[in-house]
Each structure stands twice: as structure tokens, then as C-alpha cells.
DNA sequence: CGCGGCTCATACCTGTGGGGTATCACAGGC
DNA sequence: GCCTGTGATACCCCACAGGTATGAGCCGCG
């Protein structure tokens, strides 16, 4: 009659993932019979069949699929709750900042310096992650705050503080004719036949169709550019990982990219305040607007989806 | 060692809400000693003090406050999971649409008609709620889809389908000098000394300071206008609840309001497809853009916060 | 100052049910 | 036919959630 227990959700999720009671039980570290029984109980409790078990395999029913999706989110929320609490309880009182490796070098450096020089500044631990992973890390509660990019990253559900807005540059092989240009436009780089855009894996690990090479990390991408196989468009400051074999050319009409500090909406880890103050102080262009944004970042605008692929900052 | 159980979260939440073990236990329907023990266990498991119990009361510690916030969300997610699953299992296969009473009459009517006339259309149940409650209902999983208004409502975390964009009108007492005007501007209505904007309660039930009357429902507001005590700015179609004592005057420079169909991101209750198709067909202005929007609605722009108060559609 | 009242903690008992092992029932493959 | 692999059943056990009774600190009060 009561609320679902997370144990039930974990069990269900395991079976729904594996579609096999034996393996699911093993993954859960329990025996198979209790698992079977637990699922049956869950089905009775919800008054609905969750799996079709015709001999020769288990399959999710329609309602099972609903629960599969919802259970994943619910479990994530519970785990985030636990992680954030543990983090808050950690006596070493640091705040963890996550950013993708190689991005916004100088900005981060000056931000950390400015923060450290303030009175009562909580130590900041820097965590590096792969491209596009910051949002997940933040949502899971494994970090307190992230350095992200608008409109490249998905900022939905986060509050943000703008730090720096900048243009984008095209990184092309130094040997390529394009490298001689002083500046280029998006249409110049959009369909260079011998430099097709790289393809990033989707969440399920498969790749979209297309002519470009498949990549899963920035370093692979950098090397592919050096090899003359592709080009990319990224914020000017990401030039940090430029190779000698690369050339960077300003893209005049590329949408500007803003580096932002982001944290989960309505969550203010202690010590974030000083970091934010430092961030505001560091900003080079103190516009009239204070660059502070509410919970929901916009996403999926035409602009966003364009620069998403080209800058290689989305999976 | 494992994940938190929802029971632990429920218990913790009860104590954190009540700040009193006895009352919390009563609310949970258990005795007080097991509750005390459960909380202690939770504290040991997390390795952190959650409450300060100095005699004469219980108080949340800093980490307790973190868990209080997070537990609320996690429990909401679990309950939403259960509710959505139950709803999916319901053999009566209806889809529930929630809207605030009194808004978008004709539009809803034509939408429902268009939907009903389609083959294989799932029955639609209409649920009415108070102003600004749609988002919560949707998030809790108590409804499948909602009629909401951009930029008035908070659309964060929802996918949306635009239905109708329209201007706003000022509703003023028919006896007031303003009523004679053919049209007005926002600055005209912003500070009419004898018609101050009404004040809606905040989430905690308190009211912001200001000259206007306190209201908690549309009908109260309607009556206050009729009494010549206040005015408001609302989408033109909400005129439905206009009284004889009211006058509606177009506000030329008010931000246009778009009525949208909204549903939780990445959730597609079976049958939503037909409703969406009907919705697209009903739209009066089939622009080039198809009016479909991704998960994160923008919010908290200057425009949004302005029209939020005036249209009385945010608490 | 002693007394009762309030509140949370401790001690101890009990029963439910989650987990284990052993085994069955059923389908397919050779 | 037998064997293999699957999920379901049957049965046992003990860990732990929950109950009752009681203790212990802190008030306020006469």
C-alpha cells in the first residue's frame, strides 16, 4: 500500500536491464528465487504485469517500460540525495568543480586564483571529465559546480553565472588551403568535402551516419585534425589544446559561446557564495546585466544544435 | 553500505518537517522509539549528525538541511514513478489533461473535438486545478499532459507544443476612467494609484509586501476587479471569466502569451501522439516553425517575471 | 528543592518477510 | 530419450522493523 522501496526499484531495474532473472540476481548479489518472488510481489503491489515471461526469455510489457524509465530517474534522485548529503558531511569542506579537460584554461586559472585570495575561501577541488559529462556529474551530486558552455551544453535544471562570452574559431589542418584565410564563415566550413565533421557517439554508443570520422575524445579529434581528416569549430579559449599542425581561424558568424558556472537549481553548497563573488569579479566585461540565470537554461534552439556538433562538445 | 531506502527518507523527512520525534512518529503511524532508532541508524550510515537534539527541541544541522531538500526531491521522484506506472497500468487507458480552471476555453474545446474525431483516439479526461498548479500535478505524475502558458508558467523540464499565441488584455473595473480607452500600454496600467496589482501568496503561504489586495484564487481576483479595487493583465482568451462589471482593453506592448501543451520530458504516454497531431491541426497559424520545443523551457526572463504577477498565474 | 511533565534514548521482546538452499516444471536441442 | 537452461515453488532461518515498558535529562512550578 505504501511507497515503493528503492530495493524494489533496484531489483526491477536489474531484471529490466538484463531481461534475465539469473544474471540480474547475480548482479544484485542475491539468489535467483528471492528475486523472482520480489518481482512477483512488486507486480501484485502495482496490480500490473511488468514482464512477459514466456519460456525462452523475459520481455518488458508496456507498463514495465514506463516503470523502467521512471525507476531509473527515481533511483538517480535517491542516489544523488545520498551523495550530496555525504558530500555535505565531509569535514574536509571542499567544493568540487568539474570541467571538461582542456577547456577554458586561463579563465579557470584566474577564477581559482581570485577565489583563493579571498578571506574564508573554501578549498576548491578540480575534477576533470570527458566531453559533455559535466551535466551528469552535477546531477549525480558527484560535484558541486561545473564549468559549462552555452549554448553548447545542456543547462536544463541548472542555475548559471556567466563568466566569459567569446567567438569561435575553426581548427583546421595547417597544411589545408583554408588555413591561409584570415577569417571564415560557418558556410565556408560547413561542407568542406575533404574535411567532414567528426561524428560523436550517441548515448547508446552507436554513431550517426555520415562521412566524418568517428571520435569519442578530444585528443582523438585533435589528432584527426593534425592528420588532415577533419575540422572543428570551438570557442576561442579552447585553443589550449591546439597542435603545431593545427591552424585556428576566427569564424565570423559562429554563434558566440558563453562559459558559465553552473550548479543544480536551488542547491547552494556552502562556500559557493565566495566562488560566485570571485567569478563576478573575474569577468572581463561587466555588462549591465549581471549574467545570472535562473534554473532552466534554454536548449535545443537552432543555434544550439548547430554549434553542438561542430564544437564537438555534445555526445 | 547500500542505497538509502525510501522508508529511511520518509522517516527522516517526517522528523525534519515536524522537528519533533513524537509527532513525526504519529504522522508516520508508528511508535516513537523505532523512529528514534531509525534516525540514529541513518545518521550512522551516512556518518553524519543530521539533527541537533539539545533538550528543548530538535534542530536540523547543515547536512540535515541538505538531506531534507534532497530527500524531498528523491521521494517525489519515487512517488511519481509509482503513480505513472499505476496510471500506465490502468486498463481504462485514458490520458489526463490538466489545466487551470477558466483558461483557454475555446481552444481546449476545439482541441478535444479535433482529437475525439480522430481514429483510435484515446479518451481524454480533463482535470482542473488552481492557478500555477499544473507543473506540480504533471511532475507528480497525476496527469499526463497540461495546458500551460509561456512565458507565464514555469516550463522547465517539460517538452511543449505551441498551440496559440495571443496578445494580452487589461481587465479593469468598467466604471474606471481607464475603461474608456481603446487600448493601453504596460506603463499605463503599471502604476494606477487606485488600482494596485493584487498580491499572490508565495510557496510558504506568506504574502509579499505592497499596496495591492491579497488573493489566492481567480474568482477572488475577478470580484476585486468588479469592486474597483485592482486590475490585471491576462491573455485575451482568458476573458472567459469576465464579469459584466469588467472591461477588457488590449494592452499593446504586453508580451504575447503562448498557450502550449506540455508533458514531462522524455515521457510519452501512449495516446499522446494522436493528441499532439490534433493539436497541430488545430493551431490557427501554421508558421514555418512547428512550435515544438525541447525539454527545457526558458524561465525567469524579465518578460516572464513581469507578466507572471500581472496575469496572476504564478503563486 | 522536589515533583511532575515533556521529550528523546535504551532495553527487550516479537513477527514479518527477505534471503538462502533444494527442487520442480517446462521448453528446446542433440 | 536425455541434458541444459530457464523461471517458479517449497521450505527454513534469522535479521530487523516495530511494539511496549522504562530510563534519563531538562524544563517550569509551587
Image (cartoon, coloured by chain):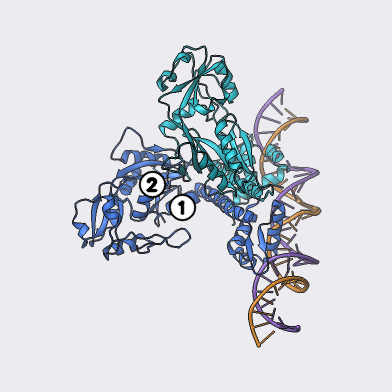
Chain colours: A cyan, B blue, C purple, D orange
Identify the residue at image location x=29%, y=61%.
Answer: B195
Q: Position of A211 compared to B180: left or right?
A: right
Residue A28: which quarter of the image? top right
Q: Which mark is residue B15?
A: none
Taking the image as drawn, is residue A60 in sight?
Answer: no
Q: Marks 2/1: CA distance?
A: 26 Å
Q: Chain of mark 1?
A: B
Pointers 2 and 1 within a single chain = yes
- Give the residue number, with chain letter if any, for mark 1: B137
Total marks shown come to: 2
Q: Nearer the viewer, residue A301 or B94?
A: A301
Q: Is residue A168 left or right of residue A241?
A: left
Q: Quadrant of the C terminus of chain B?
A: bottom left
Pinpoint residue B160: horizontal percent, then vertical percent.
Answer: 41, 41
Q: Is residue A242 left or right of residue B175?
A: right
**What percent of the width, then of the height, locates residue A311?**
50, 27
Instruction: Tell me the quarter of the picture where residue A103 sits.
Output: top right
Residue A54: x, y in percent? 61, 38
In the image, D13 versus A120, the foreground residue is: A120
Mark 2 and mark 1 residues within 8 Å of each other at the beta carbon = no
On the image, the x and y values in percent for residue A209 come to 50, 22
Give SS at disc 2: helix
Precedes in sequence: disc 2 or disc 1:
1
The answer for which chain carries disc 2 is: B
Position of A134 relative to A265 (above/below): above
Q: Residue at x 51, y 24 (%)?
A: A208
Task: Identify the residue position indicated by label 2 in the image.
Answer: B302
Please rate how many residues cluster around mark 2, counting C-alpha atoms within 10 Å: few if below 14, some from 14 to 19, many from 20.
few
Is disc 1 placed on a helix, strand or loop? Answer: helix
Amino acid at each position: 500500500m505504501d511507497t515503493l522501496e528503492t530495493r524494489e526499484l533496484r531489483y526491477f531495474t536489474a531484471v529490466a536491464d538484463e531481461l534475465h532473472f539469473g544474471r540480474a540476481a547475480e548482479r544484485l548479489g542475491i539468489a535467483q528465487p528471492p528475486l523472482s518472488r520480489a518481482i512477483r510481489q512488486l507486480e501484485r503491489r502495482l496490480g500490473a504485469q511488468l514482464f512477459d515471461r514466456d519460456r525462452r526469455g523475459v520481455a518488458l510489457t508496456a507498463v514495465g517500460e514506463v516503470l523502467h524509465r521512471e525507476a531509473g530517474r527515481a533511483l538517480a534522485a535517491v542516489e544523488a540525495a545520498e551523495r550530496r548529503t555525504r558530500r555535505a558531511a565531509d569535514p574536509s569542506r571542499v567544493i568540487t568543480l568539474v570541467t571538461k579537460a582542456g577547456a577554458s584554461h586561463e579563465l579557470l586559472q584566474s577564477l581559482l586564483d581570485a577565489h583563493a585570495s579571498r578571506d574564508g575561501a573554501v578549498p576548491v577541488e578540480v575534477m576533470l571529465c570527458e566531453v559533455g559529462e559535466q551535466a551528469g556529474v552535477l546531477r549525480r551530486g558527484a560535484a558541486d559546480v561545473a564549468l559549462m558552455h552555452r549554448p553548447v551544453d545542456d543547462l536544463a535544471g541548472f542555475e548559471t553565472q556567466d563568466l566569459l562570452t567569446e567567438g569561435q574559431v575553426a581548427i583546421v589542418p595547417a597544411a589545408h588551403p583554408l588555413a591561409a584565410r584570415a577569417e571564415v564563415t560557418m558556410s565556408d566550413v560547413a561542407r568542406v568535402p575533404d574535411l567532414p565533421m567528426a561524428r560523436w557517439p550517441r548515448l547508446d554508443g552507436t554513431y550517426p551516419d555520415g562521412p566524418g570520422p568517428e571520435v569519442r575524445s578530444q585528443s582523438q579529434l585533435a589528432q584527426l585534425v593534425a592528420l588532415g581528416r577533419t575540422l572543428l569549430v570551438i570557442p576561442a579559449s579552447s585553443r589550449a589544446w591546439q597542435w603545431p599542425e593545427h591552424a585556428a581561424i576566427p569564424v565570423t558568424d559562429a554563434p558566440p559561446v558563453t562559459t558559465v558556472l553552473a550548479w543544480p537549481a536551488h542547491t547552494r553548497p556552502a562556500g559557493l557564495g565566495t566562488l560566485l563573488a570571485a567569478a563576478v569579479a573575474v569577468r572581463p566585461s561587466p555588462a549591465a546585466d549581471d549574467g545570472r540565470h535562473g534554473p532552466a537554461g534554454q536548449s535545443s534552439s537552432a543555434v544550439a544544435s548547430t554549434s553542438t556538433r561542430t564544437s564537438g562538445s555534445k555526445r
